[in-house]
Image (cartoon, rainbow, N blue to C red):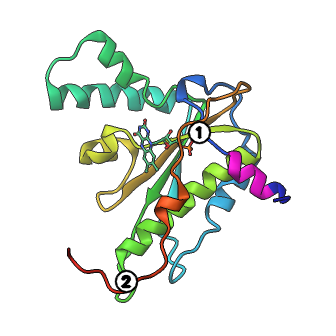
């Protein structure tokens, strides 16, 4: 295969958050990344997603609130764990929240809106990687917690598709095992039947 896009996609991989450092993309690059993230299949043109930038001081405030929430949920925590929660969004220079924000529609199922948000997150990752930035897409426990989502700035009907950590990394990350595509593909053999 000779396409540079195929070669890029065949090698794309995440970088551990602990390895992601400065610099973050500049504002013009962030705009380009988000406009590519918005250029995804979206049944009914509902744009059922939005993006939140987490950076700088805001991440420290969020971290304090997440540490307090973790203690509310679990009881008193040791300093190491509290520090982990305080630093949650401060490990990479930029975190972009890809927020699934479904709308009511008589014909288009919510499930398809969720899928479109996943597509937006993946396009965002690819765009950032194509500009030379390292990424890691996580959700973490607080995305599954209603109060955690409120702290992140989400409305009650919204969900976190991804908190994409973005920054720079110049080293090499070992390849992780990938699925064997032959195990994933079959020719259609008729309606499903319980054995
Ligand atoms: C929706 C979603 C949520 C994820 N949340 C987490 C998470 O909370 N913590 C984690 O360690 N990895 C999480 N991951 C996995 C990381 O993104 C992981 O680094 C990634 O699967 C590496 O794959 P890649 O090298 O193909 O990018 C999540 C992945 C997805 C798609």
Which residue, given by chain and number where applicable, does mark 1 sit on?
14
**Image point 39% across, 27% down: which residue?**
63
**Image point 40% across, 32% down: which residue?**
62
Q: Is residue 109 left or right of residue 11?
A: left
In the rendered image, residue 194, in percent from the top left (x then y), is placed at: 20, 76
Which region of the structure is painted magenta?
5-11
* Furthest-left residue in this view: 75
**Image point 51% across, 80% down: which residue?**
43
Which disc is residue 152 wearing?
Answer: none
Q: Quadrant of residue 141?
A: top left
**Image point 32% across, 31% down: which residue?**
66
* Furthest-right residue in this view: 2
Q: Is mark 1 within 8 Å of ligand 1?
A: yes
Of 30 and 165, nearer the camera is 165
Identify the main secondary structure in magenta.
Answer: helix
Which residue, given by chain and number where applicable, does mark 2 sit on?
105
Residue 12 visible, this orientation = yes
Q: If you read the primary sequence from the N terminus, does the residue marked by circle 1 or circle 2 appear first? A: 1
Q: Nearer the viewer, mark 1 or mark 2?
A: 1
Above or below, 151 against 98 in this view is above
**SS for callout 1:** loop
Q: Is residue 73 left or right of residue 123?
A: left
Whether residue 189 appears in magenta in the rendering, the answer is no
Q: Is residue 152 left or right of residue 177?
A: left
In the rendered image, residue 137, in percent from the top left (x then y), is placed at: 51, 43
**SS for callout 2:** loop
Residue 30 visible, this orientation = no
């Amino acid at each position: 295969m000779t396409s540079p896009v195929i070669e890029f996609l065949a090698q794309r991989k995440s970088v551990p958050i602990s390895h992601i450092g400065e610099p973050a993309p500049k504002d013009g690059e962030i705009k380009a990344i988000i406009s590519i993230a918005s250029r995804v299949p979206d049944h009914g043109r509902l744009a059922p997603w939005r993006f939140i930038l987490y950076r700088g001081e805001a991440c420290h405030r969020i971290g304090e609130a997440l540490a307090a929430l973790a203690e509310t949920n679990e009881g008193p925590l040791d300093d190491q764990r509290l520090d982990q929660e305080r630093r949650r969004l401060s490990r990479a220079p930029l975190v972009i929240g890809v927020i699934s924000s479904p709308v009511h529609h008589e014909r288009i199922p919510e499930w398809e809106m969720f899928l479109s948000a996943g597509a937006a997150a993946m396009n965002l990752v690819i765009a950032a990687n194509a500009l030379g930035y390292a990424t890691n897409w996580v959700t973490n426990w607080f995305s599954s917690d209603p109060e955690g989502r409120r702290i992140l700035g989400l409305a009650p009907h919204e969900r976190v598709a991804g908190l994409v950590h973005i920054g720079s990394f110049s080293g090499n990350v070992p390849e992780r095992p990938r699925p064997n595509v032959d195990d994933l593909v079959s020719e259609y053999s008729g309606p499903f039947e319980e054995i």
